[in-house]
Amino acid sequence: PILLNSMGNEHDYIQQVEYVKNPHLDSMEEDILYHFNLGTKTHDLPQMFGDVKFVCVGGSPNRMRSFAQFIHEQLELPGNIADIRDICEGTDRYSMYKVGPVLSISHGMGVPSISIMLHELIKLLYHARCRDVIIFRIGTSGGVGLPAGTIVITDKAVDSFFRPQFEQVVLGKVIIRSTELDEDVARELLQYSSELPDIPTVIGNTMCTHDFYEGQGRLDGALCSFSTEEKLEYLRKASEAGVSNIEMESTVFAAMCRVCNLKAAVVCVTLLNRFEGDQISTSHNVLLEYQQRPQCLVAHFIKKRLGLI
Ligand code: R2B
Ligand code: URA
């Protein structure tokens, strides 16, 4: 397809979709991806990452390591999964694992943490000349009227006012970006979920907040400025606006991927029903099993796309 280039200049066409939208990048002699401990002069990024087709990101470094091992097993790749190496071992900001065409990366908690990671990841995909990549956020969330253990595939990522947008302050001005995700990937994920037994899955809006406690209407933080009634009223309003779950990264994830032409989906499991409580009191083993659910669904999707099943 003929598309506008990264400067958006209508007279300047290029043949391929570019993942970066920054006219300054081309004039840089070297690009250091500081938080990954990678760089264009120190690493052969096309050789290391050129074959990547699926990127999975999630908050915790350990979970993303387990996911890489799980994918290794699922794709029946050769080699010992115990030997899997953290590509970002030179930094403890993020962890990154590559298994065949799949890249698994941690992003930490919250919008600023995932946004730093996404800037560097999207540049990495650009420098490595990757094409046709699909990116998934696999995570945890609080359910709004859904039982614990439900997978929510995000329709729209919305902010705390239930608006499908992400606001970023740039040079002292607020920039607003849309948070729509790839509809086809979401639909395909929902379809595949019916092939996995015993994993309840829905499509709904995901609310992204900048705090786990007061920001998500919790009564159990170190401070709380509202009543139980006010909390429930807010959750009811969220539910009426189509919100199925609450987490802390989806809006910036959707907005950045959309601007950068990356097909993206958000798949989060609910750890509790927020109408019933605030504390995550479920046992460790049950939580572990819940967290594997988005991994199973995304692995199933990848296997389908690779024609393995
Ligand atoms: C889900 O879980 C984390 C908070 O516990 C946060 O990163 C999120 O989005
Ligand atoms: N992650 C969140 O952000 N909120 C929850 O309630 C659970 C997990």
Image (cartoon, rainbow, N blue to C red):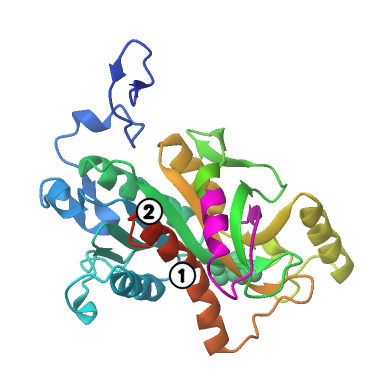
| The N terminus: image quadrant | top left
Q: Which residue in the rendered view is the most extreme toward the right?
A: 229
Say which residue label 2 marks.
305
Measuring from the top left, give residue 213's x and y in whole percent: 66, 68
Please, is residue 236 above or below residue 85 in the view? above
In the displayed structure, does residue 301 sit left or right of residue 30?
Answer: right
| Residue shown at 12% from the left, 52% from the top | 43
In the displayed structure, does residue 83 sit left or right of residue 223?
Answer: left
In the displayed structure, does residue 123 sit left or right of residue 170?
Answer: left
Q: Give the range drawn in magenta.
A: 186-209
| Residue shown at 71% from the left, 73% from the top | 147
| Residue shown at 71% from the left, 55% from the top | 243
The image quarter in which residue 239 lies = bottom right
Q: Dot 1, crowdedness within 10 Å: few (<14), some or many (≥20)?
A: some
In the displayed structure, does residue 54 sit left or right of residue 268?
Answer: left
As measured in the structure, the alpha-carbon distance from the residue carrying label 1 to the one carrying label 2 is 14 Å
Of discs 1 and 2, which sits in the foreground?
2
Label annotation for residue 296: 1
Ranked by sequence position, the earlier of labels 1 and 2 is 1
Measuring from the top left, give residue 22's x and y in whole percent: 33, 31
Q: Dot 2, crowdedness within 10 Å: few (<14), some or many (≥20)?
A: few
Element on which disc 2 rests: helix
Residue type marked 1: Cys
In this view of the protein, can residue 5 be seen by the observer?
yes
| Residue shown at 64% from the left, 80% from the top | 280
